[in-house]
């Protein structure tokens, strides 16, 4: 009998410090950086984001989200034999944030590693965990997207610093005789490395290059809209489904205009799209599991429904996961 993987619990965590656009406008004005609530809302749909306190790390957010997902699944940390953390803002160069989370949860002993695919990280991590469960390499996985993007923002660059936020989302993925994850479609095109990057690294005890986020917003926008439609259609075709079958589109929450355009291309009304970008901003690898958990906990996203998760981000990377909740 075929082995599948199924999401059996979701959880998320946002650091308590919430900045509305008005708060950010005021903060940026102190350093002579001009922006406005109108500009941010009109171009992105973002109204607020959360920033972690200085002493809070990516693994703290990830652990809090993971605890909630475990509780929802009715599992103990000791039941977990695989932890994958998708992040671009890890606690350390090494070891992986997943190992740190494993220790904080007291889930020691199973496999633990990070996946780095920027804003596509969660769909990459979910696909890897699904493959490991299908193959029998794992039974009970925690797949987490967690970010402290506020640490890598250039608050002198108004074209990027207004877009991002911090947070974490997690799912428990378990082996099952029933599907579960139906299909995945992952891609990357490394020739676009330069359009979205943090072009610094640690060398000889200091940082070489620039450790702050750089983005060519228009280039990212154009690429994102095209590839999200392609990935969704490819995942649907692999599962023998059509866009009309989708109950909820849960895309990476970067910009409401990208989400509207993707929904339109798939001929899905916006009331079938889970939107959290207005309250969370772009939390990179955390955005999809944060949106999924918000949808589940609000009661809108229900067991048995067909969900299309889609990510796109630096690399350039993109991908989709079609699943039955
Ligand atoms: N406040 C006020 N004005 C601003 C701001 C700001 N925060 N930022 C830029 N502007 C100005 C610019 O200076 C420019 O002024 P000018 O015309 O006088 O030169 C004007 O607004 C227009 O700037 P554009 O860059 O052309 O604005 P655009 O409409 O392209 O919107 C944006 C910019 C929101 C970044 C858009 O390109 C976008 O959303 N791109 C996709 C970004 C994205 O989704 N990234 C994440 C995906 S991957 C990942 O998540 C890591």
Image (cartoon, grey):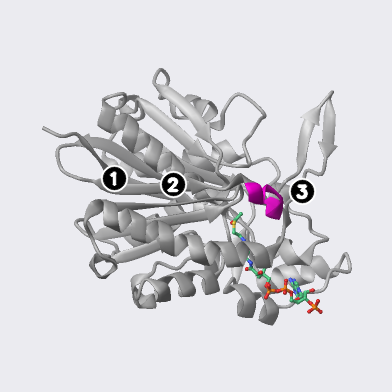
Residues drawn in magenta = 191-196
User: Where's residue 260, x and y in %?
Assistant: 47, 75
Question: How many angstroms separate mark 1 from mark 2 (CA)?
Answer: 19 Å
Question: How many angstroms separate mark 3 from mark 1 (CA)?
Answer: 35 Å
User: Where's residue 254, x and y in %?
Assistant: 56, 63
Residue 262 visible from this viewpoint: yes
Q: Earlier in the sequence, mark 3 or mark 1?
A: 1
Q: Residue furthest left?
A: 1
Residue that appears at 23% across and 60% down: 241
Task: Count residues near mark 3 (Cα–Cα under 10 Å), then give few for <14, some for 14-19, many for 20+.
Answer: some
Q: Earlier in the sequence, mark 1 or mark 2?
A: 1
Q: Earlier in the sequence, mark 3 or mark 2?
A: 2
Instruction: Identify residue for label 2.
Output: 186
Label 3: state its secondary structure.
Answer: loop
User: Does residue 193 show up magenta in the picture?
Assistant: yes
Instruction: Identify residue for label 1.
Output: 7
């Amino acid at each position: 009998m075929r082995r599948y993987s199924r999401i059996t619990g979701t959880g998320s965590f946002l650091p308590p410090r919430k900045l509305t656009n008005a708060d950010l406008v005021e903060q940026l004005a102190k350093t002579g950086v001009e922006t406005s609530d109108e500009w941010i809302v009109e171009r992105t749909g973002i109204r607020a984001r959360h920033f972690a306190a200085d002493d809070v790390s990516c693994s703290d957010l990830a652990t809090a989200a993971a605890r909630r997902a475990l509780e929802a699944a009715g599992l103990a940390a000791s039941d977990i034999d695989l932890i994958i953390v998708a992040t671009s803002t890890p606690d350390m160069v090494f070891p992986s944030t997943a190992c740190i989370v494993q220790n904080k949860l007291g889930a020691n002993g199973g496999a633990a590693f990070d996946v780095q695919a920027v804003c596509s990280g969660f769909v990459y991590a979910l696909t890897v965990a699904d493959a490991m469960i299908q193959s029998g390499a794992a039974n009970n996985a925690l797949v987490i997207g967690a970010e402290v993007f506020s640490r890598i923002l250039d608050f002198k660059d108004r074209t990027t610093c207004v877009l991002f936020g911090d947070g974490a989302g997690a799912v428990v993925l378990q082996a099952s005789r029933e599907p579960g994850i139906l299909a995945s479609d992952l891609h990357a095109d490394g020739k676009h490395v330069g359009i979205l990057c943090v072009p610094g690294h640690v060398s000889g005890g200091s940082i070489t290059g620039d450790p702050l986020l750089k983005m060519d917003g228009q280039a990212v926008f154009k690429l994102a809209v095209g590839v999200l439609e392609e990935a969704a259609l490819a995942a649907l075709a692999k599962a023998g489904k059509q866009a009309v079958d989708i109950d909820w589109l849960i895309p990476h929450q970067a910009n409401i205009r990208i989400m509207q355009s993707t929904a339109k291309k798939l001929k899905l009304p916006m009331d079938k799209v889970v939107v959290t970008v207005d309250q969370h901003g772009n939390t990179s690898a955390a955005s999809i599991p944060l949106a999924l958990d918000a949808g589940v906990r609000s009661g809108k996203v229900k067991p048995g429904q067909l969900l299309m998760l889609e990510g796109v981000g630096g690399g350039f990377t993109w991908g989709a996961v079609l699943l039955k909740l």
